[in-house]
Image (cartoon, rainbow, N blue to C red):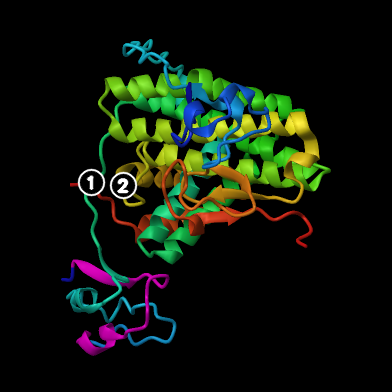
């Protein structure tokens, strides 16, 4: 069973095409330059041959994520809720802004706050989509959808697609 | 005297510049990252002897619950986590859930620029010092890093909002607003900085924020 798959970073690819020469299964011969993960056997020949370092070998399985202490999570969650209020306020103010400068500034701020919040929550126990925490959240949402408009099918599909790394 | 930019660490040295820092106009800003003059700190600031910050306040039970807006960020973060693993379909599914929560977040009542500035201020005065202290006490290096980046970005947002309130639309006329797509740092200028002053990614990681009617 393969443990890795090759992925290409198009921004780095300089089309030297060494991957085509060395791939034993023809996984890299696609028109859109996205390596065919079903054909890739994870041998790493293409990553080793690529002169521009555009191909990396990405694992299929990820380790359990770092544990977080309650003493850190409580203030982290409180800060995440504060960030959410800022994002909401910035978005509403942007929508109501008359000047183009203010509109751009507040739109930037809403995006900025969201990025900061994503970073915060990533470190607050939600680094990996395959984590036990992510699974528990998805399970809760699938079991008790928070509203009629909630995409329950998306939560169920994610539960089926993503392994749970924190389960022994 | 030497003044230091709290965002990027740029040093303004009176001796080297010829013009004393104090004589620079208030509209002067850091040549590296655009941080306003008012945010600069004198270099001679005595290294505070590891002022043991008060332990983070105990959270109430309801604080441990994440709001709809926070869950939106949690899910868009997991979508990005899927993108990094080249799982496009899973990323799209997490984005669906994130979009649900973004729409479900309750509207802010009577939002104002002053109110937004106060929210930023509260994070700078309480949110970050509290979380940083808890992370330090628990040896959580990842969360300490989050605090360093987040505090710098929030400082910049607070300063930019204050500057807009002073100068109005003139502040942003004939210039661009950029957001670092990695850490959220906001930069005002014709072109993005070569390196993000907060997280050090290259200029192409910055996104230009377009107006309602692109020229």
Asked whether the viewer can see residue B15, the reply is yes
Mark 2 belongs to chain? A
Could you classify mark 2 by the number of other residues whose Cα lies within 10 Å: few (under 14), some (14-19), or many (20 or more)?
many
Q: Earlier in the sequence, mark 2 or mark 1?
A: 1
Task: Describe residue B160's horizontal placement relative to residue B198 as left or right.
Answer: right
Question: Residue A4 magenta-drawn?
Answer: yes
Assign the N terminus of chain A to one quadrant of the image.
Answer: bottom left
Residue B118 percent across, percent down from the top left: 64, 22
Asked whether the viewer can see residue A144, the reply is no
Vertically, is A129 above or below B166? below
Whether tag 2 and tag 1 are in contact, CB under 8 A, the answer is yes
Residue B17 percent across, percent down from the top left: 53, 33
Task: Describe residue A168's horizontal placement relative to residue A143 as left or right.
Answer: left
Mark 2 lies on residue: A131
Question: Residue B135 magenta-drawn?
Answer: no
Query: In front: A130, or B140?
Result: B140
Mark 1 lies on residue: A64
Mark 1 belongs to chain? A
Residue B198 percent across, percent down from the top left: 45, 40
Q: Which residues are magenta?
A: A3-24
Residue in the picture at 25% in, 26% down: B139
Question: At numbered mark 2, what does the secondary structure look like: helix, strand or loop?
Answer: loop
Task: Describe residue A36's horizontal placement relative to residue B28 as left or right.
Answer: left
Question: At numbered mark 1, what does the secondary structure look like: helix, strand or loop?
Answer: loop
Residue in the picture at 69% in, 56% down: B210
Image quadrant of residue B169? top right
Residue A127 percent across, percent down from the top left: 35, 45
């Amino acid at each position: 069973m393969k443990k890795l798959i090759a992925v290409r970073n198009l921004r780095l690819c300089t089309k030297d095409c060494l991957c085509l020469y060395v791939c034993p299964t023809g996984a890299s011969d696609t028109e859109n330059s996205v390596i065919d993960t079903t054909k890739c056997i994870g041998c790493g020949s293409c990553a080793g041959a690529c002169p521009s370092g555009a191909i990396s070998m990405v694992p299929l399985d990820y380790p359990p994520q770092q544990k977080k202490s309650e003493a850190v999570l409580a203030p982290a969650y409180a800060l995440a809720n504060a960030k959410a209020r800022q994002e909401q306020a910035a978005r509403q103010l942007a929508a109501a802004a008359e000047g183009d400068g203010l509109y751009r500034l507040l739109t930037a701020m809403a995006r900025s706050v969201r990025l900061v919040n994503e970073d915060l929550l990533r470190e607050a126990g939600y680094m990996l989509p395959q984590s036990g925490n992510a699974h528990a959240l998805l399970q809760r949402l699938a079991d008790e959808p928070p509203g009629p408009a909630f995409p329950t099918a998306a939560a169920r599909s994610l539960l089926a697609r993503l392994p749970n790394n924190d389960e022994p | 005297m030497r003044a230091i930019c709290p965002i990027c660490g740029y040093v303004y040295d009176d001796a080297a510049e010829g013009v004393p820092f104090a004589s620079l106009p208030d509209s002067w800003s850091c040549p590296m990252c655009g941080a306003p003059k008012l945010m600069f700190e004198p270099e001679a600031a005595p290294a505070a002897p590891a002022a043991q910050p008060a332990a983070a306040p105990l959270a109430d039970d309801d604080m441990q619950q994440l709001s709809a807006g926070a869950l939106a960020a949690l899910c868009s973060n997991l979508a990005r986590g899927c993108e990094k693993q080249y799982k496009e379909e899973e990323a799209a599914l997490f984005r669906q859930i994130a979009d649900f929560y973004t729409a479900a977040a309750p509207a802010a009542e009577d939002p104002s620029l002053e109110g937004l500035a106060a929210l930023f201020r509260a994070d700078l005065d309480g949110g970050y010092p509290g979380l940083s202290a808890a992370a330090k006490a628990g040896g959580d290096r990842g969360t300490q890093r989050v605090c360093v980046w987040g505090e710098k970005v929030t400082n910049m947002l607070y300063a930019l909002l204050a500057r807009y309130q002073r100068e109005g639309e003139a502040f942003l006329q004939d210039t661009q607003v950029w957001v670092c797509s990695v850490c959220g740092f906001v930069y005002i200028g014709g072109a993005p900085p070569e390196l993000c002053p907060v997280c050090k990614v290259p200029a192409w990681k910055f996104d230009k924020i377009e107006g309602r009617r692109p020229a």
